[in-house]
Image (cartoon, helix red, strand yellow):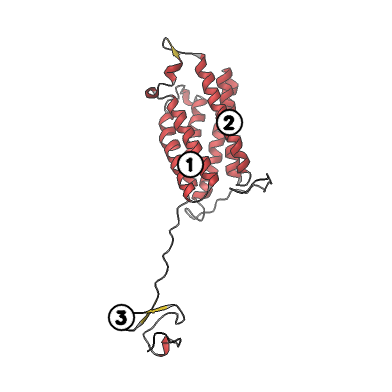
Amino acid sequence: MSTSSATNDKAYNDHFEGDATAPRCANCLGHTAPLPDPPVQRKLANPAPLGLFSFGTGFLLSGLLTLHTRGVVVPNIVIVLLLFYGGICQFLVGIVEMFCGNTFGFTVFCSYGAFNLSYGGIFLPQLGIAAAYTVDGVVSPEFSQAIGLYLWSWFVVTMLFIFGALRSNGAVLSTLVFTALALATLGMSEFTGADPVRIAGGVFSICAALCAYWGAVSGFYGKDGAGATFHSWNVPSVSLGYSQV
């Protein structure tokens, strides 16, 4: 049988199975066989639920400690959570988002991962940041002012993220809005020392955490996750005069 013939192989070989018109190649014995299938491209898992879970958990514990829940006044327990779960995990999520081609997710998750790492690092004695504001063993008022400026710097960054989130979904947008409110009020609390402002910051932090959990479960239990149905409403498109990220 000629390998260059365009006739149907099924007519000559009863053992042939498959598409007779598929591309074929000849082996050393002159028999023809289908060409191998192209390699299947592996799909990366959706990293966003992990990023949102870690973000929400950090803000939840921070908000509870800000409200002095169960009489806990010393907030140092949040440092380990911010460094490992909120910091390292979120930064890794951002790197995966970069490989997925998601500029917005890459920027946001890496930024807040760095925020958690740096905020936790402020209170690590090994870095000596808090010690630099200590005079004769007493923390000076300048330290609170510096923390307030730090939080307000991240408030500005979060406001810029909110404009990008106008093209996302309600969970992401509401998370960023409450995050901005939490950062603004917590920074103001450091400036003034007013308890009502501190309480508002704690409440906004918990609201941001709940919204982050909303976005996390909608992705984790969605079609790419556990397969359950959990939706978040899409934000109506708003023209801001720039291209989509």
What is the C-alpha distance between the residues marked 3 and 2?
70 Å
State the image coordinates of residue 161 (x, y, percent, origin top left): 59, 39
Q: What residue type is labelled 1?
A: Phe
| Side of 72 where 240 appears, left or right | right
What is the C-alpha distance between the residues marked 1 and 3?
58 Å
In the figure, 228 relative to 160: above or below? below
In the figure, 117 relative to 170: above or below? above
Q: Mark 3 points at which residue?
A: 28
What is the C-alpha distance between the residues marked 2 and 1?
21 Å
| Side of 132 where 242 appears, left or right | right
Q: Which residue lies furthest to the front in this view?
A: 4
Q: Which of marks 3 and 2 is in front?
A: 3
How dense is the environment of label 2, judged by Cα within 10 Å: few (below 14), some, or many (20 and up)?
many
Q: Name the residue under label 2.
A: 155
Q: Which amino acid does label 3 sit on?
A: Cys
Q: Mark 1 points at which residue?
A: 53
State the image coordinates of residue 160 (x, y, percent, origin top left): 60, 37
In the rendered structure, which disc, 2 or 1, sits on the residue that comes first in sequence?
Answer: 1
The quadrant holding residue 159 is top right
Q: What residue type is labelled 2?
A: Phe
Q: Which of 14 and 40 is in front in this view?
A: 40
